[in-house]
Amino acid sequence: MTPPDAAVDRAETPAVERGADQALVAVARHSGGRTAAVLGCTVAAAAAALAEPAVLGHTLDLLLRGAPSGPAWTLLCAAVIAAEVALDAAAARLTGEVDGRSAARLRRLVLARLLRTAPHHAARHAPGETAARLTAHATEAGKVPAAAAHAVAALLPPVGAVAALFLIDPWTALAFLLGVPLLVLLLRAFARDTLSSVARYQQVQLATAGRLVEALAGARTIAAAGTADRERTRILARLPELGTEGRRMWRVYGGTAARSAALMPMLLYAVLAVGGIRLSAGAIGIGELLAAVRYAALAAGVGAVTGGLAAVVRGRAAARRTAALLALPALDHGRSELPEGGPGTLELRDVRVVRGGSTVLHDISLVIPGGSTVAVVGRSGAGKTLFAAVAGRLTDPDAGQVLLDGVPLREVTAEALRREVGYAFDRPVLLGDTVEDAIAFGAGTGPGPEAVRAAARAAGADLFVRRLPHGYGTRLADAPMSGGEVQRLGLARAFCHAGRLLVLDDATSSLDTVTAREVERALAQEIRPGTRIVVAHRLSSAVRADLVVWLEDGRVRAAGTHGELWQQEPDYRSVFAADGKAGAGGEATTGPATGPATQAAGETAAETAAEAAR
């Protein structure tokens, strides 16, 4: 289970914040033209809004005097109002486009980094939290470029309105400016309180999403254990906190709106009072008084400013959550190609791997001849899976080098590496729409139907696949499969893309003994020749290997043939006996055989035991 994301959030450094801002800048550049158009439309709309009071006031004065230019100014008023409405509509449409493009761009950036990092780094974030970062939070962060444009444009009416008030009458402007310090304090408190409440809300949201996805993945276990009520309680445990933070956000927004609702009329009444006095003194006209009141309303438009500011604040907070994935270290590749026709010689030079501050693999030096089959054995926790991950560069060692046919894996291109190094896992994830797609899934040119079926036969999957409703064309969602059948498809996928190095990480653990032996034979006879690394729990896998690498506490305890280790190392024999059965995979039976399959398993066990004794 992944640790709570709160721990990750507490560890977020200024570097993550800078990364978030850099990502937002990159996103803004991606839609730079449209963002500039949003800014242009909003600024033009703000300019029209600023011109409107002056034009209306002047038109009113002209009409009151009966001036012949009054009708022309009336048409100008209509044009200014129509322009403002049209520009606002254009800005709204462009804003939707920019938001969508920006969110999509941010998701692509984050997904690219997520897919380039080592799997153990990606696993630091729970699947539910990662999904929330890539969906809701990326959407919120994608609103920042357009929101920033709107926020910049929202500053124009207040600033321009104050300047216009000075032009109309300095005394009315001074009356308004008396309340500006209160407006500044209001905006500052709003930004501070909104940022903190949004950050807490998003943190709780991530944790809840992580628990939900975890429960969905383990739905069968929960149902079998009868713990649905307990899981529901666990998932919803932080819902009250989520509600509290949500209400706090609305209280911050509502409190700001309430204070601004009290402050705005006071400012308007002050401007109206001073303007009335100036009107009675003959210093300004009725139209100018109307314009002054309208400009005071524009200058006091804190709502538009706070709305844009709130969107930017929320977006930046969401960007920091999303950018936590951008902070994952990339597993970069080089530009070298592997030598043509290389046998697959694998060399580990002083390889050391550290996890969580502890050394898991200790300075391993080993040469695996090309074309050989190597069984990696050891008790649980010995480092076998990590050894397999380093061998095919699913992760990099913290010290030392891994070379394939003399070329350091760090220097090999991504295309060459994944074309020549294949994996099969104990719990494979099937990707694609149909069973055939799942087997064919992989780098390079997709294999044809015959190659897919040949790989399935080698993995012992062809028979059960042909029994599915639509055979190889059956959708994965409509193909009920056991763990062993899923594992066979994972093997078929690996066989279909077998290169010079094939790593089987406990990839036959769910297979019965007979099927596992058939797979071993097919691997030796039907799959492209190359080097095989088999993380083995079955005695038969070690017996048939050319070389056995025995790991203990992250170190190579011994390496040699199975016969040598079996005869010379009593502790080696205990590795297989530790599970309470001869081969840790069912090679030994207790009790009578009751059917052909059981009899075959028994015969296989006897054969394996005999080979072990030899």
Image (tube, rainbow, N blue to C red):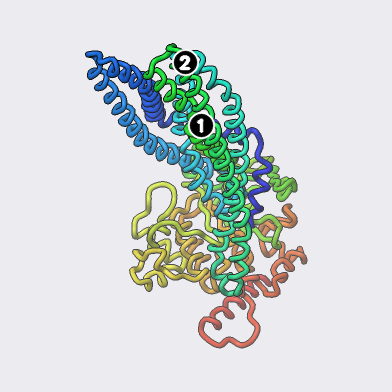
Residue 291: x %, y % from top left? 40, 21
Mark number displayed over residue 278: 2
Q: Is residue 601 above or below residue 72?
A: below
- For the C terminus, the quadrant is bottom right
Mark number displayed over residue 265: 1
Task: Name the front one of labels 2 and 1.
Answer: 2
Residue 28: x %, y % from top left? 45, 30
Identify the secondary structure beneath mark 1: helix
Q: Count neighbours of disc 1 (C-alpha within 10 A) and say few if under 14, some if 14 to 19, many if 20 or more.
A: some
Label 2 amino acid? Arg
Q: Is residue 349 visible?
A: no
Dot 2 or dot 1, earlier in sequence = 1
430 or 582, nearer to the observer: 430
Label 1 amino acid? Pro
Q: Is residue 477 visible?
A: yes
The residue that appears at 39% across and 29% down in the rendered structure is 38
Alpha carbons under labels 2 and 1: distance apart: 19 Å
